[in-house]
Image (spheres, rainbow, N blue to C red):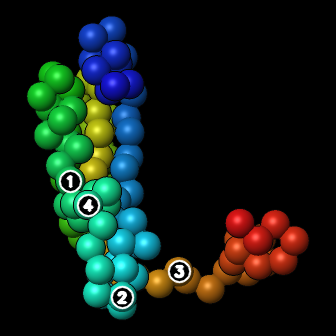
Amino acid sequence: MDIETAVRFDLPIVWVVFQNANIDKWVRQYVDGEEDPNDFTPSMRFDRMMEAFGGHGEYVERPDEIRPALERAFNSGKAALVNVIMDPAASRRPQQFAWLAREGRMGY
């Protein structure tokens, strides 16, 4: 409920939620053919939650929409949330360093 606190105290904080609907959900649903009731809905409207509290919400589905949404959020002067919907099936880009690729000692 941090967003409610930010709105109540008129704090111009901007959150960006990158929502991939949990990559494990994609694997369970499309590979294993199972559904877990604990998974989030892929397009959960966190932006509307922010608006319900009185803040500024943005909903983004395409990469070219991110910059304008961020500009509107920062210019709103309110607590704001930019809800970026990502493809849960998208793969990670190749990483230059092993620690970014989840390889090597850390292996997280």
Towards the viewer: 100 or 104: 104
Q: Earlier in the sequence, mark 4 or mark 3?
A: 4
Towards the viewer: 26 or 11: 26
The local secondary structure at tag 1 comes to loop
Crowd band around label 1 with a 10 angstrom C-alpha radius: few (<14), some (14–19), many (20+): some
In the picture, the quarter occupied by the C terminus is bottom right
Name the residue rendered at 71%, 74% in the picture.
102
Name the residue rendered at 29%, 46% in the picture.
82
Cα distance in 3D space between marks 1 and 3:
22 Å
Q: Report the residue marked by disc 2.
A: 32
- Residue furthest out toward the bottom: 31
Q: Earlier in the sequence, mark 2 or mark 1?
A: 2
Q: Earlier in the sequence, mark 4 or mark 2?
A: 2
Name the amino acid, label 1: Met
Q: Report the residue marked by disc 3.
A: 92
Name the residue rendered at 29%, 39% in the picture.
81
| Residue 101, quarter of picture | bottom right
Q: Report the residue marked by disc 1.
A: 44
Q: Earlier in the sequence, mark 1 or mark 3?
A: 1
In the picture, the quarter occupied by the N terminus is top left
The local secondary structure at tag 2 comes to loop
- Residue 57 coordinates in the image, percent (x, y): 19, 39
Marks 4 & 1, CB-CB < 8 Å contact: no
Q: Report the residue marked by disc 4.
A: 37
Q: Earlier in the sequence, mark 2 or mark 3?
A: 2
Cα distance in 3D space between marks 2 and 1:
23 Å
Query: In front of the other: label 2 or label 1?
Result: 2
Query: In front of the other: label 2 or label 3?
Result: 2
Query: In front of the other: label 4 or label 1?
Result: 4
Q: Is residue 67 above or below residue 96?
A: above
